[in-house]
Image: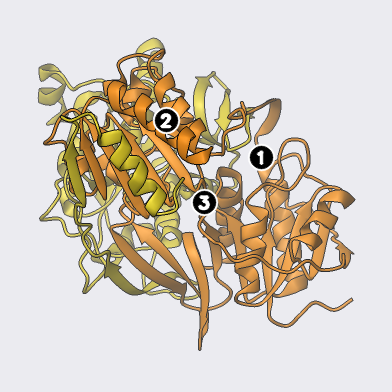
């Protein structure tokens, strides 16, 4: 079996139960815009099939390793076989770390957190955003195949399904020291709500909600809109919601179609996590809150008055 | 035990941060340089351990411009015993790859039993420097930890990734990075500030480390273009005096096909 000359090697993350991570479709989609997607799947036959359905022209498969070093060893073997024009991985914690260790070992240039990949006459380039979306930067590497991590939820391109063409990958263990993995606790799911990362709509609440109980108002509006739930750092620090809901410079950075900020003043750290949203709505009692400076629609008012009415209006509109 | 804490000096996130549209480099005039806040939490982990274990030596390593000195002194005032500052004109605009080589080389010179860092800086947001350093040094990495336990000969903790919380452990030496779930750093006291003035800070250049920033045998990332996002203007702002704000917002959302 031959591998396309313009191959883009894509490291796909797997979930604790062995399925492909949700980031896979966008990674293979991004790869298909600049070359022929070749997936590295570290898992079972079903995961390989899923990768082909998401557009991998070739699937290189090896058993799931028990450490990050094992993932990097597999990436080294896959790159030697595919001789790709670029290597893509998710900018997830697992994906970016494997990509970065690989870049060190392969002496390749590394471009982080791309929101788009493209080709110029020299090779594959990446577009990324800096300082929470205040700047857009295009980057590439001085020579060789760039190693690029891709922000989750940023790429809309999807590749066409392909029949499974699988190559079993022989992986030589590097012997680099690795940490030992013990207990694995699967992360709490967000109920029926969409994940914050990549959500089309996000409703976030701030410290002004006042308590964990009253934060339920944010969840009710989110559910009425089919939106993900976010929060400001102040709301997280106050214990209203877990830190996984934090939107901002040091939390999740989102770029949804609609972002609704409830009782959030709009500190620079928060704006850095949401200012690239297409439409921003803010409801806050303080008419001088900085969030109003970037809101497309702002209401100076009490969230506990306005939001229940808004939910009723939304239900009416949907009926 | 010698714990080396990697501290990055970054533009203060509480101020407006700007990049030069000519060079792509951070403009230092607009936001003051401070020690990155997650790095300070890593330092707190090391200092707490040192408080409870006599004979622990906490050393700070920073790679950054000359103006980093103030932040390095602050780390010493918090309680670190000594510091290394790598500063070199060749490092202006250094990418992650070069920075990791520099950190690894400096660690080799300083010596370490445990390397501690923040998981992700607030400016670059890459989140990978600790594992790159580990790869250079052939060390196990325990990164993105929300809890960490340092033992005499091993380190363990809980790694938080998108899908799971995973227990990790490794014998020392190892590289550890922590998230902002770890406790807030302590404030330097007056005694600490006075003591910091006498603590040793070794300043090193690339030549001291035997590195050459212009050596292009390793591929480097390069910036091709940079654009500032057009400023976002405010839109409609209404006051809910008449009690019809929710109706008007609902109409706005419907018009924009958001319901």
Q: Give me the residue at 39% from left, 57% from top.
A: B99
Left or right of residue A276, residue A152 in this image: right
Among numbered discs 1 and 2, the one appearing first in the sequence: 1
Instruction: Name the residue beneath numbered marker 1.
Output: A178
The quadrant of the rendering that contains the C terminus of chain A is: top right
Left or right of residue B226, residue A165 in this image: right
Q: State the separation of the CA atoms marked 3 and 2.
A: 48 Å
Of badges 1 and 2, nearer the viewer stands 2
- Looking at the picture, tell me which residue is in the foreground, B172 or A219: A219
Task: Inspect this view and state whether residue B114 appears.
Answer: no
Q: Position of residue A16 (x, y in %)?
A: 73, 36
- Looking at the picture, tell me which residue is in the foreground, B240 or B28: B240
Up/down of A239 relative to A5, above or below: above
Q: Give me the residue at 48% from left, 61% from top.
A: A114
Task: Inspect this view and state whether residue B79 appears.
Answer: yes
**Secondary-structure class at tag 2:** helix
User: In which chain is the residue bearing label 2?
Assistant: A
**Secondary-structure class at tag 1:** loop
Q: For the residue carrying disc 3, how many other residues have a C-alpha within 10 Å: few (<14), some (14-19), or many (20+)?
A: many
Q: State the separation of the CA atoms marked 3 and 1.
A: 13 Å
**The disc label shown at residue A311, or none:** 2
Q: For the residue carrying disc 1, how many other residues have a C-alpha within 10 Å: few (<14), some (14-19), or many (20+)?
A: many
Instruction: Name the residue beneath numbered marker 3.
Output: B132
Q: How is the image coloured?
A: by chain
Left or right of residue B202, residue B122 in this image: right
Q: Which chain is yellow?
A: B
Q: Which chain is orange?
A: A
Q: Position of residue B63 (x, y in %)?
A: 31, 50
Q: Position of residue B32 (x, y in %)?
A: 14, 46
């Amino acid at each position: 079996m031959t591998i396309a000359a313009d191959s883009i090697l894509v490291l796909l993350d797997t979930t604790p139960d062995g399925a492909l991570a949700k980031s896979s479709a966008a990674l293979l989609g991004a790869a298909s815009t600049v070359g022929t997607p070749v997936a590295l799947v570290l898992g079972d036959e079903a995961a390989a099939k899923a990768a082909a359905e998401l557009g991998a022209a070739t699937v290189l498969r090896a058993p799931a390793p028990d450490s990050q070093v094992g993932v990097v060893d597999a990436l080294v073997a896959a790159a030697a076989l595919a001789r790709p024009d670029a290597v893509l991985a998710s900018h997830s914690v697992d994906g970016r770390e494997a990509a970065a260790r690989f870049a060190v070992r392969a002496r390749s240039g590394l471009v982080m957190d791309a929101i788009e990949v493209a080709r110029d006459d020299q090779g594959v380039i990446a577009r990324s955003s800096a300082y929470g979306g205040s700047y857009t930067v295009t980057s590439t590497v001085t020579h060789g195949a760039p190693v690029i991590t891709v922000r989750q939820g940023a790429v809309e391109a999807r590749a066409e399904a392909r029949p499974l063409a699988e190559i079993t990958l022989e992986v030589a263990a590097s012997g680099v020291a690795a940490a030992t993995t013990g207990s694995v606790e699967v992360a709490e799911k967000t109920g029926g709500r969409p994940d914050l990362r990549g959500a089309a709509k996000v409703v976030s609440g701030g410290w002004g909600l006042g308590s964990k109980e009253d934060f339920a108002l944010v969840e009710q509006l989110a559910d009425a809109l089919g939106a993900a739930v976010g929060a400001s750092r102040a709301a997280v620090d106050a214990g209203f919601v877990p830190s996984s809901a934090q939107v901002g410079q040091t939390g999740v950075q989102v770029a949804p179609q609609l972002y609704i900020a409830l009782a959030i003043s709009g500190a620079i750290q928060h704006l850095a996590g949401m200012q690239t949203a297409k439409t921003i709505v803010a409801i806050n009692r303080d008419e001088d809150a900085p969030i109003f400076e970037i809101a497309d629609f702002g209401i100076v008012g009490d969230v506990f008055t306005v939001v229940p009415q808004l939910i009723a209006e939304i239900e009416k509109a949907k009926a | 035990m010698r714990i080396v804490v990697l501290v990055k000096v970054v533009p203060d996130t509480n101020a407006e941060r700007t990049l030069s549209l000519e060079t792509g480099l951070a403009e230092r005039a607009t936001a003051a340089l401070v020690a990155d806040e997650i790095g300070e939490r890593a330092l707190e982990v090391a200092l707490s351990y040192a408080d409870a274990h006599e004979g622990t030596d906490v050393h700070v390593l920073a790679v950054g411009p000359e103006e980093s000195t103030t932040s390095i002194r602050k780390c010493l005032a918090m309680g670190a015993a000594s510091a290394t500052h790598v500063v070199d004109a060749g490092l202006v605009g250094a990418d992650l790859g070069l920075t990791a080589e520099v950190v690894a080389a400096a660690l080799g010179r300083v010596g370490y039993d445990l390397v501690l860092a923040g998981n992700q800086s607030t400016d670059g947001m890459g989140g990978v420097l600790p594992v790159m350093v580990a790869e250079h040094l052939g060390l196990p990495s325990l990164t993105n930890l929300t809890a960490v336990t340092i033992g005499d000969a091993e380190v363990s903790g809980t790694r938080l990734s998108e899908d799971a919380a995973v227990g990790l452990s490794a014998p020392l030496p190892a590289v550890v990075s922590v998230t902002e779930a770890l406790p807030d750093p302590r404030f330097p006291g007056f005694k600490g500030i006075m003591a910091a003035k006498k603590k040793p800070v070794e300043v090193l250049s690339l030549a001291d480390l035997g590195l050459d920033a212009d050596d292009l045998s390793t591929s480097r990332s390069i910036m091709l273009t940079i654009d500032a996002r057009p400023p976002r203007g405010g839109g409609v702002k209404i006051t809910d005096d008449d009690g019809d704000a929710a109706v008007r917002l609902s109409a706005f959302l419907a018009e924009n096909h958001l319901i």
